[in-house]
Image: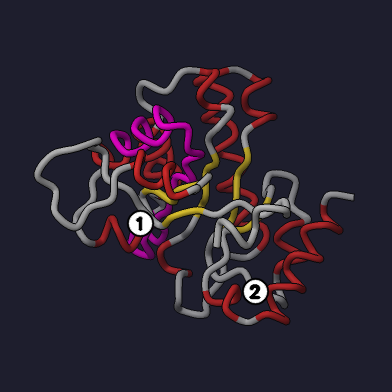
Amino acid sequence: AVRAMRETRIGIGAENCNANASGAYTGEIAANMLLDAGCKYVILGHSERRAMGETNVDVNAKVLAALENGLIPIMCVGESLEQREMELTMAHINYQVRAALSGVDAASLRRCVIAYEPIWAIGTGKTATSEQAEEVCREIRAIIRDMYGARAARGVSILYGGSMNAKNAAELLAQPDVDGGLIGGASLKPNDFATIIAATGEANE
């Protein structure tokens, strides 16, 4: 994949990495191994990984390892349906963002991407409304502003990752604090994926 994309603007990423550079971690992939394979990005803290027991401390360690090895971490945050119904969304997101970025300085933050993926909207066919997505992405930017300042908040890329598809991409991407999408199932449908890419271009015009 890396060789095939060498002459394009497409970067190759991985779905996860281990926080340790070496040791007895059979079956795990270290960040330096991804770099050696030609990866540019790595998704960290995905809700499915968290459901398997990955903690905020684990995510933070992986973010630091990715940055140390020159990878761009795409760190995922998001609330469950129960947390949303109990009106704990913002408190939960606040904690996840701050925990994941613990020890990350302002210079390193510029190489980070944050993806908001409401757990209740992943693989369920449900999607946050554009207003709901914007509300949380705006809050994430406010958290970054509080931690790193206004300039850093303007510069960080915030993606929406909860069942974005060909039908809703344009409306979601039109939101001022949604900078792009973390696409799941729709990426396996070429025509739908092309529509989403086109919507991204329109949102940036």
**Residue 24 visible at all:** yes
From this view, report whether residue 23 is shown above or below residue 195. Answer: above
Please, which colouring scheme is shown?
secondary structure
User: Is 70 a magenta residue?
Assistant: yes
Which residue of the protein is positioned furthest toward the right in this rendering? Answer: 205
* Residue, disc 1: 83
Which of discs 1 and 2 lies nearer the camera? The answer is: 2
The residue closer to the viewer here, 204 or 94, is 204
**Is 100 left or right of 184, judged from the image as shown?**
left
User: Is 187 a magenta residue?
Assistant: no
- Mark 1 and mark 2 in contact? Answer it, CB < 8 Å: no
- Mark 1 to mark 2 CA distance (whole Å): 24 Å
**How far across and down, in percent of the image, does residue 117 sit?**
48, 57
Q: Quadrant of the N terminus?
A: bottom right
Magenta region: which residues?
60-86
Q: Secondary structure at mark 2?
A: loop
**Is 64 left or right of 127, judged from the image as shown?**
left
From this view, report whether residue 85 is shown above or below residue 110. Answer: below
